[in-house]
Image (tube, rainbow, N blue to C red):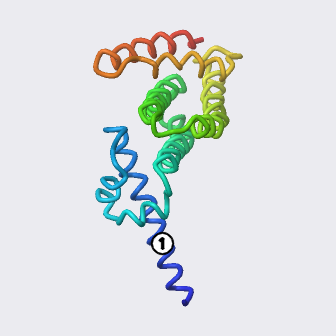
Amino acid sequence: MSQPNRDAQRNVAQHNRARILEVARDALTADGDASLNSIAKKAGVGTGTLYRHFPNRESLVLAVYRAEVQRLVDWVPELLEAGPPLIALRQWFERLAGYIRIKRGLGDALSAAGHDTITNETYGPVIEAITLILRAGEGDGTIRPGLDPDDVLLMMGCVWRVPPGQAGEEQAERLLDLIIDSLRR
């Protein structure tokens, strides 16, 4: 097989993988029990293609969560360019809470080992992102100096532990307001 053909196949495979992840994120967020067949169909690929990329449900769930956390971590510089660090921190934690709700909602699809693996893989990058935002806030004088990013993450845990539904979302907003206010200089 010639190099252009292999490159074209590789491009198609990468496109299919990205499309599957995009569709799976939306489908699994809406319904943690969404079938892999329905995800393949919505992504416009055959089930064999889905299973070539993701041999089981857990591997797909882990890949979706990894991609979302990486997207979140990569978003920090853009947030800091767009506005003050306290606003960036709030926006960042709102999105993180959404991702963690996705993970929590998909908990049944993850084995205990898979859950531990993804938590351990994503913890470091999440702490680095929080550190970057906190230091930017220290630098501009809006965030109290000396905050430990691990403590801030632990405090923020209450935001994604609210019950599902409108009342839970409203409670999360109130909790986030309290936490952000406590971080102000």
CA neighbours of label 1 inside 10 A, class few (<14), some (14 to 19), many (20+) = few
When the figure is inspected, residue 179 is found, relative to residue 56, above or below; the finding is above
Provide the secondary structure element on which disc 1 rests. helix
Q: Where does the C terminus fall, quadrant-wise?
A: top right
When the figure is inspected, residue 81 is found, relative to residue 168, above or below; the finding is below
Residue drawn at x 69%, y 19% is 148
Q: Where does the N terminus fall, quadrant-wise?
A: bottom right
Q: Which residue is mark 1?
A: 11
Q: Residue 43 in the image: state x and y as whole percent.
A: 33, 59
* 67 or 36: nearer the viewer: 36
User: Which quadrant holds residue 127?
Assistant: top right
When the figure is inspected, residue 49 is found, relative to residue 103, above or below; the finding is below
Q: Residue 132 in the image: state x and y as whole percent.
A: 64, 32
Residue drawn at x 39%, y 52% is 22
* 115 or 102: nearer the viewer: 115
Residue drawn at x 32%, y 38% is 31
User: Which quadrant holds residue 126?
Assistant: top right
**Is residue 62 toward the left or the right of residue 46 in the image?**
right
**Is residue 168 toward the left or the right of residue 141 in the image?**
left
Q: How many marks?
A: 1
User: Which quadrant holds residue 12?
Assistant: bottom left
* 162 or 174: nearer the viewer: 162
* 181 or 98: nearer the viewer: 98
- Label 1 sits on what residue type? Asn
Q: Residue 96 in the image: state x and y as whole percent.
A: 49, 31
In this view, the residue farthest toward the right is 146
When the figure is inspected, residue 77 is found, relative to residue 169, above or below; the finding is below
Q: Residue 128 in the image: state x and y as whole percent.
A: 66, 34
In this view, the residue farthest toward the bottom is 2
